[in-house]
Image (cartoon, rainbow, N blue to C red):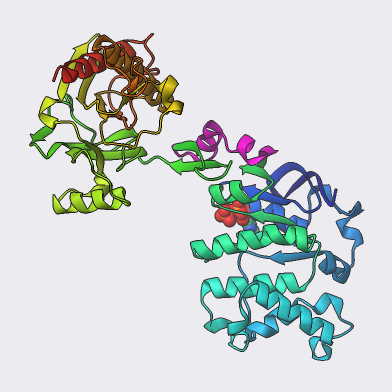
Amino acid sequence: MLLNVHQLTAGYGGEAVIKDISLAVKEHEIFGIIGPNGSGKSTLLKCMYRGLPAESGAIEVEGRPLSAFSNKELAKRIAVLPQHTETTFSYTARQVVELGRYPHQGGWFNNAKAEDKRIVDEAMQETKVEAFADLPMETLSGGEKQRVLLARALAQEPQILLLDEPTNHLDISHQMNLLNTLREWTSSKKITVVAILHDLNMAAMFCDRLMLLHEGQDTGTGKPGAVLKKDKIEQVYSASVQRKSHPAVPSPLITLTPEPGPGMDEAAIDRMEVERSADLVKITSGDYWKTFSSSIIGEGFGWHKVFVNRHVALDYNIDDARQEYIDYMKQKKIDPDEAVGMMTAARLENGRDTRRTIEGADVWVMATAGVSNALDASRAYEQHVPMEIGTINIWIFIDGRLPEAAFAQVMMTATEAKTRALLDRDIKDVVSGTMATGTSTDSLMVAATQKGMHHPYGGTATVLGRHVAKAVYDSVYNALEK
Ligand SMILES: Nc1ncnc2c1ncn2[C@@H]1O[C@H](COP(=O)(O)OP(=O)(O)OP(=O)(O)O)[C@@H](O)[C@H]1O
């Protein structure tokens, strides 16, 4: 282990701020320290660079006690980016970076050698601060200063970089750049990073391991996914959070949940406004519904309050259908960010809806069903039918609270019920002649108020699932009558 901390207790004026902390940082890893304000993160980091003596316990670098290193020896191994840096003299940015070479020099920096110059240049390039080289530090912005100080730490060519909130003052793009650069340096420059980070999501994405401090104690060290547990974060930070997966990388994503505002009133479904014409069916709600949808607009999970099913010609074929739909919505004075939008070539007036309010479930289903391109899913691989907007579009509104898994279960339940309606209406695959299970362009949306009755599951074994299934079956079956 490169850096070992054994049962460290330290603080100020005889009062322990961090208690019995042990950790071992491996070579070339990024080790993150997280925790609320005042939990002792900076105090722990200070001990690691000998900025604060330990009351008890020990710290070793390369197996040697920290106290055994001369200042210069230590500075060749450890560079620090502290939280607050006051520069009393007026240095230019370049002079500040040159200070980083001090531990490697025989004397002061006026005898800087070519090698030092090269390293300073490189550090300034890496942190993109060459443009401010000759400007006095005090004229730089907070983020620019931060990058110059990082260049100084880098110019020190340390094995270990200790960073106290390195992303402080940096905008999101520079935060991302810095953390990407640090990750890259762990392999290209073989450095090891210990960083205090406030942004839990950045910490999760960039750190190999995290330590979560709470009131000076380690609440657990490990991989980000293991440390950033919802219950633990809520307890340590006294905040209500949601934990999800990052949509693009395998990393947890922690989001704050604000105190609930004035919620939806009772009978949310009854208060929705329905507008019907040959061109569109539009349902408007005063409140946002949590939606899970396969639609062209408002797809995936989201929160929406306008629901549009739009009629298009059977030969509708536009390259950028999404953009065309957005333009259509704008023309109709509908905000596409607030809307779920589907399209169909089926006649909207043949659409059917079913309301079921029994056994505590309150479900409303609307379906339009065109079956010109009905097909048997098990035979679809044989077919080369051009995609038409035939389409069975189904909307399911639920006045209740559902976890995300229940949204997926409701989708399955609804799909099964839809298929049964097609079988009972004797709808055939237009190519194979076998029984159709759907059409090639069906769409489905589940919307829930996320208030009131809790429905943990949405399968057909549940009250919710049974009523969704029946309402979908009836709506699709009756819509197919025409
Ligand atoms: N020089 C000091 N003298 C006395 N008390 C101090 C000193 N520095 C910090 N403390 C106290 O030690 C506790 C931990 O502070 P520390 O700076 O280590 O917390 P932190 O987790 O880094 O907080 P933050 O997220 O706010 O930066 C705080 O209660 C703080 O007031």
The percent position of residue 127, horizontal first and vertical second, equals 64, 72
The percent position of residue 436, horizontal first and vertical second, equals 33, 18
Q: Is residue 354 left or right of residue 374?
A: left
Q: Dividing the picture into quarters, in which one does residue 219 lie? A: top right
| Residue in the image at 39% along x and 14% along y | 459
The percent position of residue 288, horizontal first and vertical second, equals 25, 38
Q: Nearer the viewer, residue 170 or 33?
A: 170
For residue 463, above or below residue 476: above
Q: Residue furthest bottom?
A: 110
Residue segment shown in magenta: 218-240
Q: Dividing the picture into quarters, in which one does residue 402 lie? A: top left
| Residue in the image at 34% along x and 37% along y | 386
Q: Is residue 40 at least partly visible in the picture?
A: no
Q: Is residue 57 left or right of residue 412?
A: right
Q: Is residue 309 left or right of residue 211?
A: left
Q: Is residue 421 left or right of residue 333?
A: right
- As for residue 284 lying within the magenta part, the answer is no
| Residue in the image at 69% along x and 85% along y | 95
For residue 375, above or below residue 80: above
The percent position of residue 237, horizontal first and vertical second, equals 51, 41
- As for residue 230 lying within the magenta part, the answer is yes
Q: Quadrant of the C terminus?
A: top left
For residue 14, above or below residue 450: below
